[in-house]
Image (spheres, coloured by chain):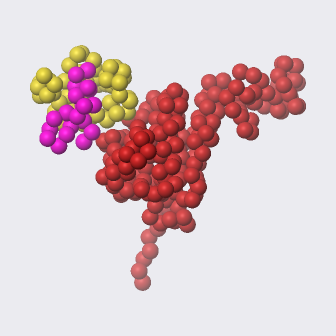
Chain colours: A red, B yellow
Amino acid sequence: MEEVKEQVISLPRLGEPAPAFEAVTTHGVLKLEDFKGSWLVLFSHPADFTPVCTTEFIAFAEIHPELQKRGVELLGLSVDSVSSHIAWVRNVEEKTGIKIPFPIIADLSKEVSLAYGMIHPGQSKTETVRCVFIIDDKQTIRTILYYPLTTGRNMQEILRIIDALQTTDANAVATPANWRPGDMVVVPPPNTQEMAEERVKQGYECVDWYLCKKKL
Amino acid sequence: MACISPDGKPTESGAKMLRALKSGLGSPEEIAKDAGLPLFRVRSGLRELAQAGLTNQKDDRYEITERGEELVK
């Protein structure tokens, strides 16, 4: 009887180090550690020369200046070859006038895709789904988003998450639902009864002791 | 190869890095600033130039080799 071996791969989780890689890209061979000191948005797309992916690449290129202002680099990935990536980005530029300014991993071996859990066989056994990994300057995974093959990503939400994470890091606060930069932030809830009693006297805008907001 | 063309000559970004090294800069951060290139590109490019024998790495700094200098004369 034939023995079936199944390899169990532990998927990356929030707060854990991003899996290291060395990969061929449209900008040469890059390692994860090359991005140390910058934030990184690592995202996968199903395939080159496909309609939704093309709209997403144009949208990523459009937010690239905003990401740069926040110290964030972009890195795309699919299981296509580097020649296919080069032909596609050249085609996008020729047809739309938009230059794709960031590198794209050619993950033919699926090494990076598998390490990051980008292939979801229920959606496709051969293509990566639309994943977004937001990795901070210390190379820790801070956010993971998965979108199905049929749904293009929302760039404003990606920018909003980065703004929220960087605001949280800089000010030791949290951000409420639908937060946008400039909105009030949530003060971490008190851990003791004494702190709860003090909290309501501290001049924050409080619904009750556990939900207080402040302006930055 | 991002910094060296198949004919062995440095690409535009490779030449920028070599010129920055020739001017005395040595850290990837300094070279990125001088060459106007993203830091990740410079880190990867310097690695490639070192593999091609055009730079030497000493700790966190790089130096241009004689062969590297020949290419940006």
Q: From what the image shows, is residue B13 above or below residue A151? A: above
Q: From what the image shows, is residue A189 above or below residue A21? A: above
> B66 left or right of B20?
left
> Can residue A211 be seen by looking at this rendering?
yes
Identify the residue at horizontal 27%, vertical 18% (top origin).
B25
Q: Nearer the viewer, residue A94 or B31?
A: A94
Q: From what the image shows, is residue B58 above or below residue A53? A: above
State the image quarter where residue B63 is shown. Answer: top left
Quadrant including the N terminus of chain B: top left
Number of marks in the rendered image: 0
Identify the residue at horizontal 42%, vertical 34% (top origin).
A35
> A192 left or right of A126?
right
The location of residue A36, given as percent across then percent down, is 43, 32
Q: Nearer the viewer, residue A64 or A145?
A: A64
Quadrant including the C terminus of chain B: top left
State the image quarter where residue A178 is shown. Answer: top right
Identify the residue at horizontal 78%, vertical 31% (top origin).
A189
Q: Is residue B3 magenta?
A: yes
Q: Nearer the viewer, residue A157 or A16?
A: A157
The location of residue A207, given as percent across then percent down, is 87, 31
The location of residue A17, given as percent across then percent down, is 50, 41
The location of residue A95, given as percent across then percent down, is 41, 47
> A164 left or right of A83?
right
Q: Is residue A84 magenta?
A: no
> Can residue B58 be seen by looking at this rendering?
no
Range of residues picked out in magenta: B1-20
State the image quarter where residue B49 is shown. Answer: top left
Residue, far top: B24
